[in-house]
Image: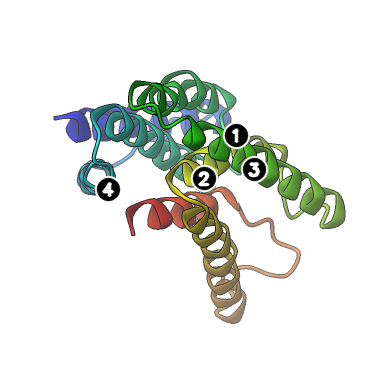
Amino acid sequence: MLGLLGGAWVVLTAQRNIARIQHSAFQLGIPERCAIVLCTIDIAMLLAKSADRWFAAIGLVIIGCGLIAIGIIDAATHRVPRYINGLIITMGVPLLALDAIVHWDLGNILRAGVGAVALFAFFVGLKSIAQGSFGKGDVLLAPIIGFALAYNSWSTWVSGVVGIFLIGGVVSAALLFTGRVSRKSRIAFGPYIVAGTLLALIL
């Protein structure tokens, strides 16, 4: 049920944001809506299954739905909506923290906090070095995914970060090779962040 609601929310949020950002009457067709809803339900179920406690499961599902919406919007508009970041921070992250408090796993919060700061600092450094390759939205997204990944474990954090750049590199190379984009084209990095993060959390 939570996955179904998340899927519907993702569709509505993505469509409204893309339309507003592009200033056009953007519409998702029925096949696209169904695909997004089904994909969100599957990911939500896998995220919930990966957590063995209720608060953590619900927190991960909220974070996952928010990330899917961000990935779709960024792919279409090259912008990461800050208010969705805000929803994840105010709704998903506190549930993970509450899970740690209820089960007295305070080490999880400490590790997650360090992971969030470390990934944020890493992305800030990359943005200053590779100007134009990373947007401000990508940098602001870093502490959220750093927190979620490190909350699970350091190995999940490392897998997520490696996965983000591995997926980004492979897909970007394929797009360049097939001529879909040029070296001067702007490539949204948000979808790679989302894909790498979700895969690390699920697997």
Q: Residue shown at 20%/44% (left/top)?
A: 45
Which circle's residue, 3 or 1, is located before the other in the chain? 1
Can you say which quadrant of the picture contains the N terminus? top left
The residue tagged 1 is 113
In this rendering, the answer to whether 196 lies above or below 104 is: below
**Amino acid on which disc 3 is placed:** Asp
Which circle's residue, 2 or 3, is located before the other in the chain? 3
Residue 90 in the image: state x and y as whole percent.
48, 18
Label 4: few (<14), some (14–19) or many (≥20) C-alpha neighbours in 10 Å: some
Q: Residue shown at 21%/27% (left/top)?
A: 5
**Amino acid on which disc 4 is placed:** Ser
Which circle's residue, 1 or 4, is located before the other in the chain? 4
Determine whether the residue tagged by mark 3 lies in a helix, strand or loop.
Answer: helix
- Name the one closer to the observer, 201 or 98: 98
**Amino acid on which disc 2 is placed:** Ala
In whole angstroms, how far apart are the C-alphas of marks 1 and 2? 8 Å
The residue tagged 4 is 50
Label 3: few (<14), some (14–19) or many (≥20) C-alpha neighbours in 10 Å: many
Check residue 138 in the rendering and tell me which mark sits there, or answer none: 3
Residue 6 in the image: state x and y as whole percent.
27, 31
Determine whether the residue tagged by mark 1 lies in a helix, strand or loop.
Answer: helix
Direction bottom: furthest residue: 177
- Name the one closer to the observer, 71 or 201: 201
In whole angstroms, how far apart are the C-alphas of marks 1 and 4? 20 Å
In this rendering, the answer to whether 154 lies above or below 144 is: below
